[in-house]
Amino acid sequence: MSKSFKLTLFSLSLQAKMSRPVQARRLEGIDKNIWVEFVKLATTYSKVNLGQGFPDFPAPDFLTEALTRVVSGGNHMLHQYTRAFGHPPLVKVLAQLFEKLLGRDLDPMTNVMVTVGAYQALFCCFQALVDEGDEVIIIEPFFDCYEPMVKMAGGTPVFVPLRPNPPKGGKLMSSADWQLDPTELASKFSERTKAIILNSPNNPLGKVFSCEELGLIAELCVKHDVLCISDEVYEWLVYDGKQHIRIASLQGMWDRTVIVGSAGKTFSATGWKVGWVVGPDRLLQHLRTVHQNSVYHCATIAQEAVAQGFQRELTLYGKPESYFVQLPKELQRKRDWLIQSLNAVGMKPIIPEGTYFLVADISPFKSDVPDVPNSDEPYDYRFVKWMVKNKGLAAIPLSAFYSEAHKNNYTNFIRFCFAKEDTTLKAANDILQKWKQEKTSS
Ligand code: PMP
């Protein structure tokens, strides 16, 4: 090869590398993600990590035993592909359960689809139902992937915040005190609105939407012919005798709602990544198109074991031995313990009605956290970084769950996860007690 020919090839390859943008336009502005930074901080500095939302206690024995049976049992076909839209035993048992919960007949093959966690269920919803130019209403604070998922689908997120109403008589605030302003919510619906995403029980606040609140949302959806993506991954984690109401069961809503669920949350096995959608075939048929052209299906063995878990729960439905009864009871005790520990040090916890998250007000600590000159980093971000480095306790700043436009109004709060072993909560309590002593002696 001549020297000049080699040189030409070299400059051509340089040009190829330099002239063309490699990043697809749909990724513009969505590349930042707080989890990367805060997970790294927690692993570097924390003694106790109450930041990320997953249990550090084991999944129930009946579930892990089911997986062992599946893996070591004689059916080698469970190691092969299964039906793309959901392993038949799993879609069948999910249909049976949701028939009971929704009070309507369901076809397991068309009204249920299994996904790779609730994450992929959400991705399928946005890709299948949202078009360029469509608006999607997102209630703040929100599970942070909703916004980039709407944008990747070409849609425009329209945000409406839950507004805190201070409780009377010096009581601790409850997640129920965070409410939608009905007029403000109604003003967000227009002919461009394609869907609203509802998350009840809500991550990060723990709010369980009341019948009246859901009624208002349903009325607006019907009036404006809007779809509802209803993220109900924490459906079984509801406390103090509260009830989780499924918006799909309200009048006029079944035909326009996709329910999103997660075995990870339901059975305390977030690493299994088994999720599902339940809804009318007219919507699910389009989700199936996205699903079959992207991931095809999730692990057959995990689906089979989750199916066996649900079969157990169906036979024990409503009984005290049911995991759906035991888990919230256990988590409510853990919630109350963390509330006490945080309260002692002067953080004002907002009592969550559901989920395994708890938001606390950190406004009394402003003088403890050093200002960073020339930095526009919000107070809650600074507080979490300071707390993890100085106290060894990790949490997540609440403003990360808000849109850019509204973030600055919600920088006085942080989120903790209380789905943790008692030993972890005790270690957190020890840190907080020591902190309290330091405060009183200084
Ligand atoms: N929705 C919400 C509200 C969540 O909090 C989570 C997980 N943190 C998911 C969906 C995703 O669930 P999965 O782990 O099943 O993908």
Image: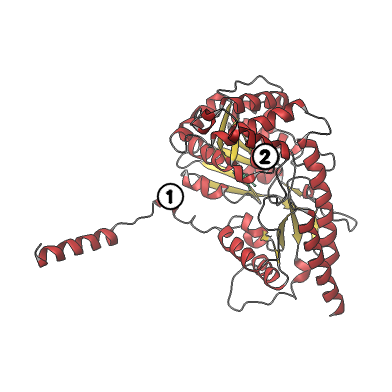
Q: Is residue 140 visible?
A: yes
Q: Secondary structure at mark 2?
A: helix
- Near mark 1 (Cα within 10 A), the count class, few <14, some 14-19 or many ≥20, is few
**Mark 2 neighbour class, 10 Å CA radius: few under 14, some 14 to 19, many 20 or more:** some
How many labels, in total? Answer: 2
**Label 2 near label 1: C-beta < 8 Å?**
no
Residue 76 percent location from the top left of the image: 53, 30
Question: Mark on residue 26?
Answer: 1
Nearer the observer, 52 or 366: 52
Q: Pinpoint residue 349: horizontal percent, then vertical percent.
A: 80, 58
Determine whether 430 is above or below 406 in the image.
below
The image quadrant where one finds ligand 1 is top right
The amino acid type of the residue labelled 1 equals Arg
| Residue at x 65% of width, y 26% of height | 93
Kindly identify the residue that appears in the image at 67 percent across and 39 percent down: 64
Near-viewer residue (173 or 427): 427
Question: Disc number at residue 64?
Answer: 2
Which quadrant is the N terminus positioned in? bottom left
Residue drawn at x 87%, y 75% is 440
Answer whether residue 243 is visible to the viewer in this image.
no
For the residues marked 1 and 2, what is the alpha-carbon distance in whole angstroms? 40 Å
Say what secondary structure mark 1 lies in: helix
> What is the residue that sits farthest to the right in this orientation?
169
- Quadrant in which residue 189 is drawn: top right
- From the top left corner, tell me how far across and down residue 285 is, in percent: 50, 27
Instruction: State left or right for residue 405 relative to residue 296.
Output: right
Q: Amino acid at mark 2?
A: Thr
> Residue at the left extreme?
2
